[in-house]
């Protein structure tokens, strides 16, 4: 019997499994997709908000502040990128400046540091800020991360400590049994004492397997442009003043890899899995970014994408044991700032678990992971030494991002490693650059086939049957 089954391997499930792996518990993470974090955690603004925005008295406010405070240390331990770029909240005119006063008061009460700048002072530091901007709050401790990397690093470390990760294992039913629950998936049945529902936009379906939910998931799409690394129009994250209707608004975000994101919009959806971009959504992004910024080179866009917020009819995070379903815990309604809050969301779930279980510490737990080789970040001497040891680091496969065959092999062979083309792309970035995989994808297919001991015809792009090649036409 498992102690805990976590449903969903997004940042909520991943961070929780990592923190739980410090205990001697038998934990399984069930993920319906063919890789981890394919939901909201894959497609978002990647901002570690510092906690000035959520309304007073909410779990969002409490857990955002607590979660953000842990992030830098977590990223250091797990060798993940963490760039403190700072966030400007830009007000245009007296009405919007009043909203800045509200945010400033919340920041003071929550111990979140900031500077108050005039429009002209801010423009000296951020030259493309629009002339309409009259005042700016500079939340200079705000950071950006690569959310997918953090989720993967958490699961890699957790799995090293004994956690089981089951991919392609959608939870189909949950039935109460003596001492817990029986969770059924096409990959097998899991008997467990506790269940954690971290299923994002599908959390309502999971909840309704044990009790009728008093809330509904109301998914909201957000669409983005990704600008080429050569086009870097901003130094800080630039936010408009937030509003109740449109949330944080359309932002510009300098990512950890030097690309700039422009987005998102915020549109309710009927289909929680409809993650395609739309003409209307991108037009909204284009027209709204010009309010706070000039000279955004949207003609340097190399890709567009959309993410879906697991919003519900409840305006706050829901983290609680479900009434009438003992030992079934929801970690749901995790919309923004869910990423920034995730370390504290995990703590909150563990606090609930510890009310009814007293697990021993896992004496062998190692809460770090091995730093991956990133050739681009090494000096010429370090690179040469590495290539002499292993020539695969000398063969560049992705020219845009300068990724070597050695790095691709590493990401396939490591725990929770890649077994799909998109999995390689997300772990080490071939295909993320200007050519979007035009040159490197065929090579990645062949490396995957060789490493996994399968035919190139069996290599998939992402989901289980998303084959890329139809037949061999060359010998
Ligand atoms: C456009 C956008 C911008 C955002 N920007 C920010 C930001 O800048 N900062 C911030 O803090 N937050 C931001 N967020 C919010 C943040 O991304 C989410 O709060 C967070 O990623 C939620 O993580 P999760 O693990 O709860 O959900 P998800 O990442 O969606 O993970 C849920 C997982 O459950 C799996 N699953 C679903 N059903 C089943 C099933 N039946 N069986 C097994 N597995 C299942 C899914 O496949 C998925 O992998 C943003 C979100 C969006 C969409």
Image: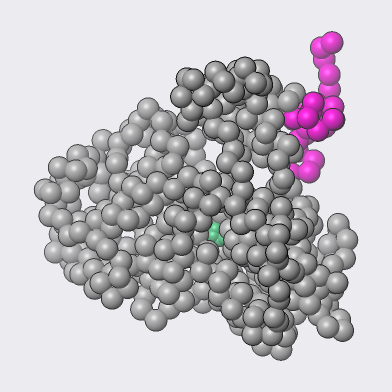
Quarter of the view holding residue 300: top left
User: Relative to the observer, which residue lies in front, 114 or 198?
Assistant: 114
When the figure is inspected, residue 467 is found, relative to residue 37, above or below; the finding is above
When the figure is inspected, residue 230 is found, relative to residue 136, above or below; the finding is above
User: Relative to the observer, which residue lies in front, 100 or 92?
Assistant: 100
Q: Quadrant of ligand 1?
A: bottom right
Quarter of the view holding residue 99: bottom left
When the figure is inspected, residue 6 is found, relative to residue 167, above or below; the finding is below
User: Relative to the observer, which residue lies in front, 349 or 215?
Assistant: 349
Give residue 71's position: percent from left, percent from top.
Answer: 46, 58
Residue for point 16% across, 44% down: 123
Residue 458 colored in magenta in the image: yes
Residue for point 22% across, 42% down: 126
Looking at the rendering, the stretch of residues picked out in magenta corresponds to: 448-475
Q: How is the image coloured?
A: one colour
Judged left or right of residue 391, residue 231 is left
Give residue 57's position: percent from left, percent from top.
Answer: 39, 81
């Amino acid at each position: 019997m498992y102690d805990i089954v976590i449903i969903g391997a997004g940042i909520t499930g991943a961070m929780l499994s990592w923190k739980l792996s410090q205990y001697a518990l038998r934990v399984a993470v069930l993920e319906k997709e063919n890789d981890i974090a394919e939901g909201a955690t894959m497609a978002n603004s990647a901002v570690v908000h510092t906690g000035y925005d959520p309304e007073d008295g909410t779990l969002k406010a409490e857990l955002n502040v607590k979660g953000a405070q842990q992030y830098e240390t977590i990223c250091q331990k797990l060798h993940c990128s963490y760039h403190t770029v700072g966030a400007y909240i830009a007000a245009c005119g007296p009405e919007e400046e009043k909203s800045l006063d509200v945010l400033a008061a919340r920041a003071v009460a929550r111990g979140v540091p900031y500077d108050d700048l005039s429009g002209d002072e801010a423009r000296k530091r951020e030259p493309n800020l629009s002339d309409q901007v009259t005042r700016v709050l500079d939340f200079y401790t705000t950071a950006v991360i690569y959310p997918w990397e953090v989720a993967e690093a958490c699961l890699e470390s957790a799995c090293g400590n004994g956690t089981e990760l089951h991919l392609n294992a959608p939870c189909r039913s949950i039935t109460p049994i003596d001492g817990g629950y029986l969770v059924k998936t096409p990959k097998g049945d899991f008997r467990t004492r506790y269940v954690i529902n971290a299923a994002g936009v599908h959390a309502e379906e999971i909840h309704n397997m044990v009790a009728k939910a008093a809330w509904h998931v109301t998914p909201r799409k957000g669409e983005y442009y990704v600008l080429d690394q050569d086009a870097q129009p901003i130094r800080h994250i630039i936010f408009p003043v937030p509003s109740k209707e449109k949330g944080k608004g359309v932002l510009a975000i300098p990512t950890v890899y030097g690309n700039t994101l422009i987005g998102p919009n915020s549109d309710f959806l009927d289909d929680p899995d409809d993650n395609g971009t739309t003409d209307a959504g991108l037009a909204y992004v284009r027209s709204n970014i010009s309010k706070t910024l000039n000279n955004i080179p949207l003609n340097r866009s190399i890709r567009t994408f959309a993410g879906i917020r697991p919003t519900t009819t409840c305006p706050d995070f829901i983290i609680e044991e479900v009434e009438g379903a003992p030992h079934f815990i929801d970690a749901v309604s995790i919309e923004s700032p869910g990423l920034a809050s995730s370390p504290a969301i995990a703590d909150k779930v563990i606090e609930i678990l510890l009310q009814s279980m007293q697990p021993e510490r896992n004496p062998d737990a190692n809460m770090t992971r091995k730093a991956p080789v990133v050739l681009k970040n090494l000096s010429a001497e370090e690179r040469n030494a590495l290539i002499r040891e292993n020539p695969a680091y000398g063969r560049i496969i992705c020219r845009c991002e300068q990724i070597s065959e050695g790095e691709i092999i590493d990401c396939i062979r490591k725990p929770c490693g890649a077994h799909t083309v998109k999995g390689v792309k997300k772990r080490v970035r071939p295909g993320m650059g200007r050519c979007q995989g035009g040159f490197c994808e065929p090579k990645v297919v062949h490396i995957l086939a060789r490493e996994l001991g399968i035919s190139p015809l069996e290599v998939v792009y992402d989901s289980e049957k998303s084959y890329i090649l139809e037949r061999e036409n060359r010998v």
